[in-house]
Image: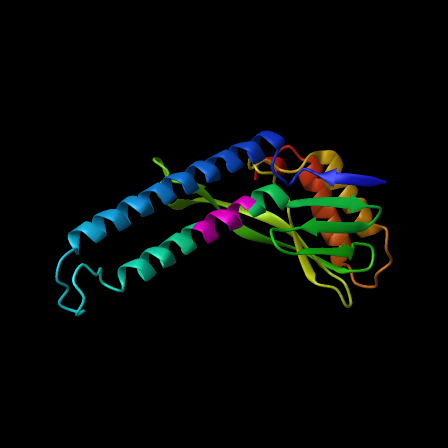
């Protein structure tokens, strides 16, 4: 049985992110053209750094190009993560798709443990991000020869994964036989998050 996990963006969120990225890139492109035109007018005339009249300083174009590339790279990374990020549990095998990479691990045999990362939100007005004071729980797994993969146990809206999905992850972890108790402890926490109302508020 294959279960898509609710960690990725919804269709509406993907559409909104794509539209926002397109608008930002258009505005950035227009802004860059206006800036270059103004810079060319400001620096028109004899240039003390160059012998030729009417030449703009050589540093203007590279600086604008670097800023534009940085902005495009940032937007592209965020957009790719929003569109591509997702996860699926097939039997006991967990597949996680990131912006540029993907990985899988068999939860029945892999080393598994729980971790967390700080949660951030946009500041009012959209200027930068701030720490919410909460942490996002992560399920981490690594097979004998595979990559380490991390699964966020919250969806894009900040809510914990549905109980059915957390229970399926716990079942997958417990489906293997391991001598150490760590896997059983991980499965127990996953079940608590799935069924304990107070746990789901964390």
Image quarter (top left, top right, bottom left or bottom right) of the N terminus: top right
Position of the C terminus by quadrant? top right
Q: Nearer the viewer, residue 89 or 137?
A: 89
Residue 110 lies in the magenta stretch: no
The residue nearer to you, when weighing 197 against 74, is 74
Q: Residue at x 76, y 57 (%)?
A: 105
The residue shown at (18%, 59%) is 54
User: x, y (%) of residue 108?
Assistant: 83, 55
The residue sitting at 74% across, 44% down in the picture is: 88
Is residue 32 toward the left or the right of residue 53 in the image? right
- Residue 140 at x, y = what percent? 67, 56
Magenta stretch: residue 77 in it?
yes
- Magenta stretch: give its range: 72-79
Residue at 57 percent across and 42 percent down: it is 82
Decide which of 189, 4 is in the foreground and name it. 4
Asked where in the image residue 87 lies, by quadrant, the reply is top right
Q: Decide which of 72, 143 is in the foreground and name it.
A: 72
Residue furthest toward the front? 52
Q: Mostly what secondary structure, the magenta segment?
A: helix
- x%, y% of residue 142? 72, 61
């Amino acid at each position: 049985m294959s279960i898509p996990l609710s960690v990725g963006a919804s269709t509406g969120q993907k559409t909104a992110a794509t539209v926002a990225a397109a608008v930002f890139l258009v505005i950035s492109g227009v802004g860059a053209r206006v800036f270059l035109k103004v810079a060319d007018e400001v620096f028109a005339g004899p240039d003390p750094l160059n012998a030729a009249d009417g030449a703009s300083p050589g540093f203007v174009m590279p600086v604008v190009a670097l800023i534009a590339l940085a902005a495009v790279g940032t937007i592209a990374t965020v957009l790719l993560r929003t569109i591509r990020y997702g996860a699926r549990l097939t039997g006991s095998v967990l597949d996680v798709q990131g912006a540029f990479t993907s990985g899988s691990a068999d939860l029945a045999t892999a080393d598994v443990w729980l971790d967390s990362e700080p949660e951030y939100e946009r500041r009012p007005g959209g200027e930068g991000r701030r720490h919410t004071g909460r942490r996002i729980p992560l399920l981490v797994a690594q097979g004998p020869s595979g990559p380490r993969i991390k699964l966020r146990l919250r969806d894009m809206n900040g809510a914990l994964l549905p109980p059915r999905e957390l229970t399926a992850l716990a079942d997958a972890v417990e489906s293997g036989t391991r001598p150490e108790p760590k896997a059983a402890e991980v499965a127990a926490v996953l079940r608590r998050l799935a069924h304990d109302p107070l746990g789901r508020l964390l």
